[in-house]
Image (spheres, helix red, strand yellow):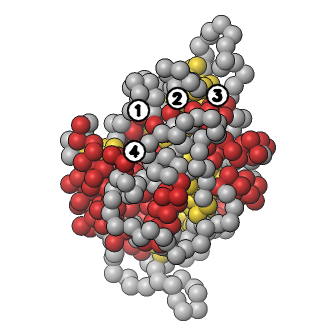
Amino acid sequence: MSDISFTPARRHVLGLGCERGTQPAEVLALAVEALKAVGIVADELAAIASIDSRRQEAAILAVARHLAVPALFFDAPRLERETPRLKNPSAVVFARVGCHGVAESAALAAIGDNAELVLGKIKSAQATAAVARGGCRKPDGRYGGGNSRRQPAASRFTFRGHIMHKVIYDTDPGVDDAMALLFLHRHPEIDLIGITTVFGNASVETTTRNALFLKREWNIPAPVAKGASVTIDAARAEREWPAMVHGDNGLGDIEVPATIDLPLDPRPAHRFIIDTVRANPGEVRLVAVGRMTNLARALKEDPEIATLVKDVVIMGGNFYVPGNVSPVAEANIHGDPEAADIVMTAPWKVAVIGLDVTSITTMSRSYLGRMAAEGDGAVKLLDALSQSYIDFYKHAVEDGMMVHDSCAAVYVVAPELFSSISGAVRVVCGGIADGQMIIKPDGRRFPPGDWDDRPSQIVTTGIESEKVIDLIRDTLLRV
């Protein structure tokens, strides 16, 4: 396997990466999917290459044997030494299993200026792929080699083809909402197809204005639809807006025009959600980081959408740590408990990203400042609007802030950075524990109760905080 020769007719390289314990069948499923994405058959493969995967050699070799091609193993220091022997292959298909990021795969694809790169990701048996091409786009629309001088791989690829995640972002901007919005806008595996607003960090008029402002400043093409202004139970008393957290204007009291000259989608947010889900059955992921009112309204008007949504990711709740607006409740759930209970008990899949993980995932002022110094105007604006938010968190974080909503955005593309439990979840509505989320863990037996015959949902309980913060940085700095 160490002496591989490549003939002109067999110039494709399949690159595989996987995590410890990945089954060969899973790797093979993604490999086949990735090959199909660019019309390559196994007979056209020169070899299978792997970077930093020696602990998974058995899985890689099993795939190589199945496809009847040689296998090469690289570690990062060997990459530069090995690439000349690959004779500038015309295509590299790089399939990643249970991993996030594209650094290694882009480096492997840098073997050739004309290389085609396929990025893939697998969860169990489900395989998806996104396609990118290297080099410069020529005037006739074809892709050519461009400058042959070695450049940073990330700057040499333009993502196109299959977008992995269609996302509607339900939000109440909000400082941490703004960071998550920029993440969703810039991550190459996310197609942000809509922004829906809700009351919470400020009135819905203010949060909608803020969403339009950020859409304009960050050149976000997704439409904005205005949502709920009051709780699903109209009898609930209104609470004061948390100006001490997000500022009077919701964006850290930076200068924001009173009105933004951009159109709103004419539909109310819950109707926008219904129509978009029905137009894309089985594809839309709802990422909700405010009150759950818009989602609850959508379910009440059209219960069938629960079977048409791919899944729901929410930022809210707390299970094994204290709340942040009462000893037992987190702000988003406490702000509309009835809506949250409707969402958690609907027959769709929900992943809860709560204070158990977000309260230990923090970004320092200096870290954000370095990002702003390196980044473009969008990151500089994010840095400016975050300053008073960082000041607020001085009671809990040393010169930094919790990045609550961005954790939910990260979960969309990198759930492997989280650990979780599953079970039926209910929300307390009223009384001293108003807004408390309570899980009945799967496998635990209790007498008959209000959790029975409710869907099992995912509750995150652990997080690789440093990796999450680094992924946020890498994504926000990607232009």
Of callouts 4 and 3, the N-terminal one: 4
Of callouts 2 and 3, the N-terminal one: 2
Question: Where, quadrant-wise, is the N terminus in this rendering?
Answer: bottom left
Residue 310: which numbered mark, if any?
Answer: none
Question: Do tag 4 and tag 3 residues touch (Cβ < 8 Å)?
Answer: no
Determine the secondary structure under disc 4: loop
Instruction: From this view, report whether residue 472 is shown above or below residue 54.
Output: below
Task: Decide which of 189, 227 is in the foreground and name it.
Answer: 227
Residue bearing the label numbered 1: 325
- Seen as rendered, the residue at the extreme top is 447
Name the kind of residue labelled 4 in the image: Pro
Task: Decide which of 241, 92 is in the foreground and name it.
Answer: 241
Image location (x, y in percent) of residue 25: 62, 42
The residue carrying pointer 2 sits among few (fewer than 14), some (14 to 19) or many (20 or more) residues within 10 Å by Cα, namely many
Name the kind of residue labelled 3 in the image: Ser
Name the kind of residue labelled 2 in the image: Gly
Residue bearing the label numbered 3: 456
Residue 242: which numbered mark, if any?
Answer: 4
* Of the two numbered discs 4 and 1 in the rendering, the one whose residue sits closer to the viewer: 4
**Residue under the point 30% across and 60% down:** 383
Residue bearing the label numbered 2: 435
For the residues labelled 4 and 3, the Cα–Cα distance comes to 32 Å
The residue carrying pointer 1 sits among few (fewer than 14), some (14 to 19) or many (20 or more) residues within 10 Å by Cα, namely some
Task: Decide which of 197, 102 is in the foreground and name it.
Answer: 197
Of callouts 2 and 1, the N-terminal one: 1
